[in-house]
Image (cartoon, helix red, strand yellow):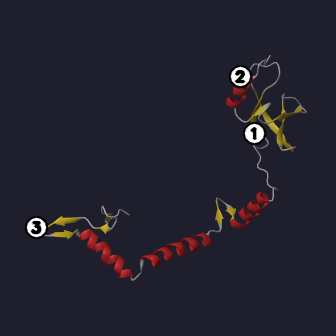
Amino acid sequence: MDRLTIRNSDGAWDVPLRGDDDGAYIPSQEIIDRLAAYEDTGLEPEEVEACKVALMGKSLAEIKEIEGISVDRMKNLAKAKAEGRLLVLPCKVGDRVWLIVQGMSSPMPVPVCSLTWRDGKWSINADREETEPPKVVGFQIGKTAFLTREEAEAALRKEPDNG
């Protein structure tokens, strides 16, 4: 909503006035209409603020789920996070990651077979070759396995000797 009032130089509220045909200055009809509509509510400014807060609380109470996740589930997840029991996977099985393998000049894309959390670090077990059964090898995320090709290439450029 656009304000119809302004603060004057001494900090008091003021209403911009316009001149009429007789040279008298009067508030615009829009200001008069808005003030009348507000006064018709019978509410004081503090009561208007209380109504806004109450409506916001009611709206929040009516929310049952967000993006398909129930509020109770979100509470459980928040509690698990606060207790240090929540881990967020960096990717999922089947996603493609980019490996830096010694002797190769460019990152190699491979599918993720499984993920391991150990000592505060994620490792990816990835299928390095299209053979049956797959050769599964552990790679540490951020060190030898990367979620994007760009990250892997940047890491290769930082290596003093990549071949």
Name the quadrant containing residue 92.
Answer: top right
Residue matched to label 1: 95
* Numbered label attached to residue 40: none
Of circles 2 and 1, which is in front?
2
Where disc 1 sits, the SS reads: loop
Residue situated furthest bottom in the rendering: 42
Residue in the image at 76% along x and 34% along y: 142
- Residue 66 horizontal/vertical position (percent): 64, 61
Q: Dividing the image into 4 quarters, which one contains the N terminus?
A: bottom left
State the residue in front, 99 or 155.
155
User: For the residue carrying disc 3, how many other residues have a C-alpha within 10 Å: few (<14), some (14-19), or many (20+)?
Assistant: few
Q: CA distance from mark 3 to mark 2?
A: 77 Å
Name the quadrant containing residue 139.
Answer: top right
Q: CA distance from mark 2 to mark 1?
A: 24 Å
Amino acid marked by disc 2: Arg
- Residue 163 horizontal/vertical position (percent): 80, 16
Cβ atoms at labels 2 and 1 below 8 Å apart: no
Amino acid marked by disc 1: Asp
Amino acid marked by disc 3: Gly
Residue matched to label 3: 23
State the residue in front, 114 or 14.
14
